Amino acid sequence: MRVMTWNLWWRFGPWERRREAILEVLRAERPDVLGLQEVWERPGENLAEWLAAELGMHWAWAPGEVLPHWRERVGGDDPFGVGNAVLSRWPIAETAVLRLPTAGGPAEVRTALFALLAADPEPVPFFTTHLHSGVAGSAVRCEQVRALAGFVAEQRRELPFPAVLTGDFNAEPDSDEIRLLGGWLTEPAVPGQVLVDAWRFAEPGQPWATWDGGNPYIADAAWFDARIDYVHVGLPGRPVLGRVRGVRRAGDGPVAGVWPSDHAAVLAELQEG
C-alpha cells in the first residue's frame, strides 16, 4: 500500500499551473491513498474532487478556515475556501471530522479528517490533519495532538489494520508534540497507543526535509530546513499488517518548470497482508 501525505499550498503562487504539476506527480507516484492539506475549493469546484476524477479515485473533504493573512497575500477577498482531503483507490465507507482545540492559541479552525477505507483484505482507518503553524506554538500543538490521538483511538476501534495518520504537523521530529504521538513522553497522549513515524525506516542519507530551502517558493523564508510532514502508523497488526517497508520524499522538484508546492510530499509503502 502506497501512502502519501502532501500540503498543496492552497492557491499561492502560480496555483493553476501548480495544479497540473501536482497531478503529474500523483500520476507518476501512483499512491493508493493520500492525505492532503491546504486544498482549495470555490463554488462548484474543489481541487481534491478534480484530482480524484483525473486519477479515478474516491475522495472525502473537511473544510477549514482561510486565515486572514492568507487572503491578504493573494489580493484580498475572494471565493476560495480551504480544507483537508483524503483520496483513495478504495471506496470510502465512512468519514468523521474532529475540530482541533485552539488551546489558548489563535481562534482558527483546524480539523482532522477520518476516512475508513474499504480496502482488501482489511479496511484501513486513515486520518489526515494540519496543526497550528506558529513557530512558538508547541503548547497549542501538544493539546491538538492529545485531542487527535483520542480521535484516532475512537475511530480505529478494534480493526486489525493499524491506524494511519498523515499530515502537516508544523513540528520537527524531536518536538514534544511528535513524541506524544509516539508514546515517548511520561504521559502519552493515549496510554498504550503508539503511532510510529514512518521516516524511522528511511534509507540513510536520503533527502529528508519537507520544508526545504532549495524550494524557490520558500527560499527567502526558510531560515532552516525542517521535516514537518509525516506518515505515522500504529504498531503492525496480524501478522504484519501495516508494517513500513520503505519511505521517501516525493514531489520535491519542478515539473515542466513549475514546483508543485512549497512542501515536499512523504510517500510510505506499507504491508497490506
Image (cartoon, rainbow, N blue to C red):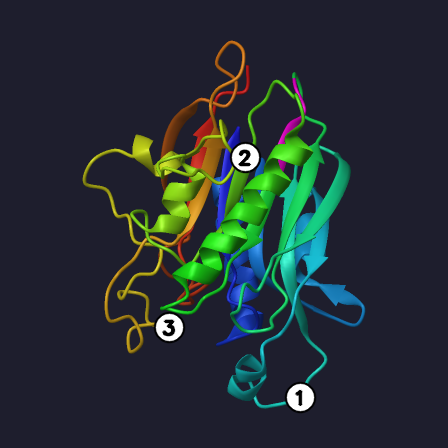
Quadrant in the rendering for residue 201: top left
Residue wearing tag 3: 217
3D distance between C-alphas at marks 2 and 1:
36 Å
- In the image, the segment drawn in magenta is 122-126
Image height of 97 relative to 272, above or below:
below
Looking at the picture, tell me which residue is in the foreground, 91 or 236. 236
Q: Residue at x 61, y 62 (%)?
A: 110
Mark on residue 77?
1
- For badge 1, the amino acid type reads Asp
Q: Earlier in the sequence, mark 1 or mark 3?
A: 1
Residue 183 to residue 76: above or below: above
Tag 1's secondary structure? loop
Q: Is residue 135 above or below residue 251?
A: below
Callout 2: SS: strand
The amino acid type of the residue labelled 2 equals Val
How far apart marks 1 and 3 lie (CA) works out to 22 Å
